[in-house]
Image (cartoon, rainbow, N blue to C red):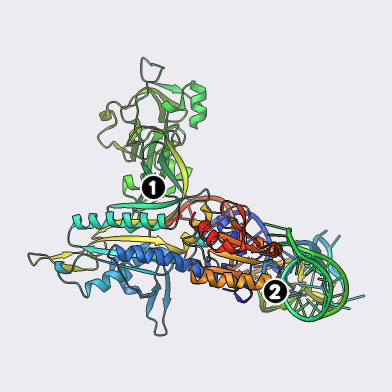
Amino acid sequence: MRWSRFFLYTKKEAPKDAVTPSHIYLVRGGYIKQVAAGIYDFTPIGKMVLDNIREIIKNEMDNAGAQEVMLSFVTPYELWEETGRAKKYGDELLRIEDRKGQKFVLSPTNEESVVDLVRSYVKSYKQLPINLYQINLKFRDEARPRFGLLRGREFIMKDAYSFHATKEDLDREFNLMQETYENIFSKMGLDFRVVEADSGAIGGSGSREFMVLANTGEDDIVVCTECNYAANIEVATKKHIKKENPIKTEIIEEVHTPGKKTIEEVCEFLGIDPYFSVKAVVKKAIFDNKEEIVVFFVRGTDTLEETKAKNAIGAVDLADASEEEIEKAGLVPGFIGPFGIPSNIKYVIDDDLRMAEELVCGANKKDYHIKGAGLLDANLLGNLTVYRDIAAVKEGDLCPECGKPLKITKGIEVGHIFKLGTVYSEPMNATFLDENGKAKPFIMGCYGIGVSRLIAAAIEQNHDEKGIIWPKEIAPFLVDIIVSDVKKEEQLSFAESLYEELKKAGAKPILDDRAERFGPKIADFELVGFPVCVIVGKKLKDGKVEIRNRKTGEKIEVNKEEVFEKILEVLNS
RNA sequence: CGGAGUGUAGCGCAGUUUGGUUAGCGCACCUGGUUUGGGACCAGGGGGUCGGGGGUUCGAGUCCCUCCACUCCGACCA
C-alpha cells in the first residue's frame, strides 16, 4: 500500500471523550470513527486488523472441526418468545418492526436462531455432534456503552454452538474449545488467563472466561501467586482457616453499644478485631414473582460478593434495601445479627463464619450487640440456617487449591465458554432420536469471542505513550518504509524497489510516500503501531538506511544491500 | 435507569456571566514559494442551520421553555 493513496488519516489531538488508551489510539490512528454511542465505522486499516483476527479464529475453529455458518442478524421475535428470553433479556434486546408490523430483533446472541436451524435438519444421534460457528455482527442496546471498542452496542462476535447426544460428549467439546481458545489467544500474542466464571443469565452448568490482563479491564480476577488457580471474583473461593480469638469471654452477653452502627464504630468501642465481628448486609432480593428482604452475614473484614449472594438464594437480582424497607421487615438497622433475627427473615451466613467463635454481632435490638457469640451449633439459630460462600475474595486470602496467597488483577473478558445443557433445546422442543428411538433434547454448549473487543484489548495490553505496538500476528502492515524526502528521486526509487521486494516476500509493507517531512512520518509510525520501520533518508547517499523495532525501540543502521534480510531478521526476532 | 456535565468549521477550543457591527483562535484543508531525520516557515485562500424546535426582544451563540444527541461516575452488562 502506498500511504499517499491510502484512506488513512491520523490525528495529533485525542478526541475529548476518549479516556482509555485503546480508544484514544484507535481514533487518533485513524482506525475507527464514532457514528453514534457505541457504534463505530471501521476504516480500511481498522478492517485489516479485524480481518487478521478473524483469520486466526477461523483457522483454529476449522481445525477443531467446527463449521462456519452465517445466521441472520435480523431475527423473528417469535423465536425469543419460545425460550422466554424476549422478556428476560430486557431493554438490551433491540426490537424492530417491518412494514407489515411483524416483530424482529437485532441479534444480541444467537442461541435461538441456531437451535431453530439445527432442529429443522437434525433428527438422529447419528448426526451428532455438531459445532456451528459464525463471525458476525451483534447488537446489544447497552445502557452505557463506553471505552470505544471495549464496550460497544454494535460489535463483531465469534459465536459457536455445539450439539451433543450426551453430557460426556459435551464435556469433550468444551475442553476442545478451551484448547482452541488458548491457541487463538496465544497466536494473537496476548497475555491472558482462563478463569472460572459465573454462568449468568445465559444459564447452564459450567463456564470459563478468557481474560486479557490489562489495567483498564472491567473485571476483577483472582489469581494464585503459586499455582494456576484463576477465577473471576464473582465465583472465586478461598481456603477457610480458623483463627483463634485471643479474647475469651466467659459468657455470651448483650452489651450496650449506643449509636454504634458500623463495624468500625462497634469494634473500636468494644476494642475488638473486626475479623471477629459479623457484618450484616441487607438486600432486597428480586425473584421472578416476588421481592423479599434477605440478610447476608459476612465477617467484618469481608465484603459481600453480590453475584455469589444472588446465586446462593436463587434470586434474579439483588437491589439495595432502603432503611424504611429494612425497618418494615422487622429489622433494626445497625444492630442486625443472626441470633434472635425475626423468624420470617431469610438469611445466609458466609462459609468463613461456619464454626467461628467469640464473635460480636448485632442483637436485633436498638443500641445492643452480642459479645462472645459462636456459630458452633447451628441449631441455636434454628434449622433454616444456610451457609454459603458469599464473601468476596480479597488480596492476601489463601488459594483454595494450594493455600498460597491470592492476588487480584484486572482483566478484559474476550472469550466465554458455557455448558448450556438443555436450557434452550428443551423449551424450543429441539430433539433427536437416541439409539432406542427415544426423543431427547440436544445437549448444548456455546462459545463466544468478542472479536472487535479483541482489537481494543490487544491495544490495552500493547501500547506506550506514543501509540499502539501491534503484535505482529494482527498488525495491519508489518513494515513501514519511510521515505524521508519524497522529492529526492534516489530515496523514492530505492524505497519503491524495497517495497516491491517485501511485498513479494509476504512481509506486508506500507510505503510512506506522502509529501510530509520526517517528523510526522515517524510519529505516525509510532502512533499507528507497525512492528518495524525502515527509514530511507539522507544517509542513503552513503549506502545506509535505518531499521527500527517499534516494540524494543532498537535502531540499527544497515547497508542498503542487506536491508531486506535484516528486516526479515528483525521481524522474526 | 440514578447522579453530573457537554453541544460553536473535519478535530481541539474561546466567546454565553452582563443580548448589540460581518462569530473568533490553534490544528487540519486548498494555492504559491522556501524548507526536508522528530509533528517547519512565509504569503494568500476556502469552510459555520452556534445540536433541533418554540418563545422573549428593535436585536439572541448569549435570556426563557422544550426536545435531542454525546460524555463521565454509578447501577447494569452471555
Tell me if residue A294 comes above or below residue A82 in the rendering: above
Classify residue A88 by image quadrant: bottom left
Say whether residue A24 is left or right of residue B41: left
| Front residue of B42 and A488 | A488
Q: Residue furthest bottom?
A: A100
Of callouts 2 and 1, the N-terminal one: 1
Q: Amino acid at mark 1?
A: Thr
Q: Report whether residue A56 is seen.
A: yes
User: Measured from the top left, where is residue A485 in percent x and y?
Assistant: 71, 69
User: Measured from the top left, where is residue A95 in percent x and y?
Assistant: 42, 72
Q: Secondary structure at mark 1?
A: helix
Cα separation, mark 2 vs mark 1, equals 66 Å
Mark 1 chain: A
Provide the residue designation for mark 2: A489
Classify residue A129 by image quadrant: bottom left
Provide the residue designation for mark 1: A307
User: Measured from the top left, where is residue A345 in percent x and y?
Assistant: 34, 40
Q: Report whether residue A34 is seen.
A: no
User: Measured from the top left, where is residue A469 in percent x and y?
Assistant: 55, 56
Q: Secondary structure at mark 2?
A: helix
Q: Nearer the viewer, mark 2 or mark 1?
A: 2
Instruction: Using the image, tell me which numbered label, if any, was put on residue A255.
Output: none
Q: Residue at x 38, y 58 (%)?
A: A184
| Front residue of A160 and B43 | B43
Q: Residue at x 39, y 53 (%)?
A: A210
